[in-house]
Image: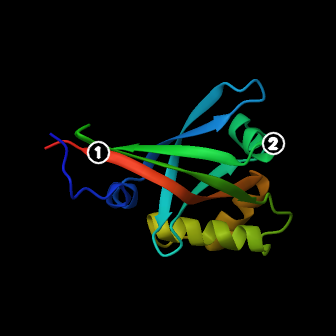
Amino acid sequence: MADAAYDPRDLIEATRLAVLATIRASGVPQLSPVTAVYDRGADAILVSMTDGRAKTANLRRDPRAALEFTSADGRSWATAEGAVTLAGPADSPSDAAVDALVDYYRAGAGEHPDWDEYRSVMVADRRVLMRLRIDRVYGEKLN
């Protein structure tokens, strides 16, 4: 039996691992496991990814995505759908796109032991920050 008071955003906020669905040029979904951070104030989900990967290329072509979250016991799930914006990759560790990746890291993991190193790695790895603004969210919690 489903829980009528269930708010899928609670699971999205509590769960870091998700499956990101993007759309290939052929129209077939492409799924990727990702680490996601929910910004409740902006009602947006953030994901760091590498430029040039399938999911990044798909989102540059068609900036719509869905993320699915499942509880550890498998009895709750939440899906968020929405439009995506991408920031990066950056050319400099002091670029605004890297600042956004620092904010993403802090929200998901706290303080990094060496921010200068982190910033340099974000540039060298051609990291991109995806922001999905939630347009639709749904899910279920089984009792």
How many numbered callouts? 2
| Percent x, y of residue 44 | 54, 64
Residue nearest the viewer, comparing 66 with 128 = 66
One can see residue 114 in this view? no
From what the image shows, is residue 101 above or below residue 143? below
From what the image shows, is residue 21 above or below residue 106? above
Which amino acid type is shown beneath numbered disc 2? Arg
Left or right? Give the position of 16 relative to 83.
left
Q: Earlier in the sequence, mark 2 or mark 1?
A: 2
The local secondary structure at tag 2 comes to: helix
From what the image shows, is residue 32 above or below residue 79? above
Q: Which mark is residue 52?
A: none
* Picture residue at 49% right of the left edge, 73% below the top: 111
Residue nearest the viewer, comparing 10 with 94 = 10
Residue nearest the viewer, comparing 31 with 97 = 31
* Picture residue at 62% right of the left edge, 29% below the top: 29
| Percent x, y of residue 27 | 71, 27
Q: Which mark is residue 61?
A: 2
The local secondary structure at tag 1 comes to: strand
Left or right? Give the position of 127 relative to 8.
right
* Picture residue at 77% right of the left edge, 52% below the top: 126
Which amino acid type is shown beneath numbered disc 1? Glu
Q: Which residue is mark 1?
A: 140
| Percent x, y of residue 129 | 67, 58
Q: Of circles 2 and 1, which is in front?
A: 1
* Picture residue at 34% right of the left edge, 59% below the top: 14
Left or right? Give the position of 5 relative to 13.
left
Furthest residue toward right: 91
Few, some or many C-alpha atoms within 10 Å of disc 1 (few <14, some 14-19, many ≥20)?
many
Q: CA distance from mark 2 to mark 1?
A: 31 Å
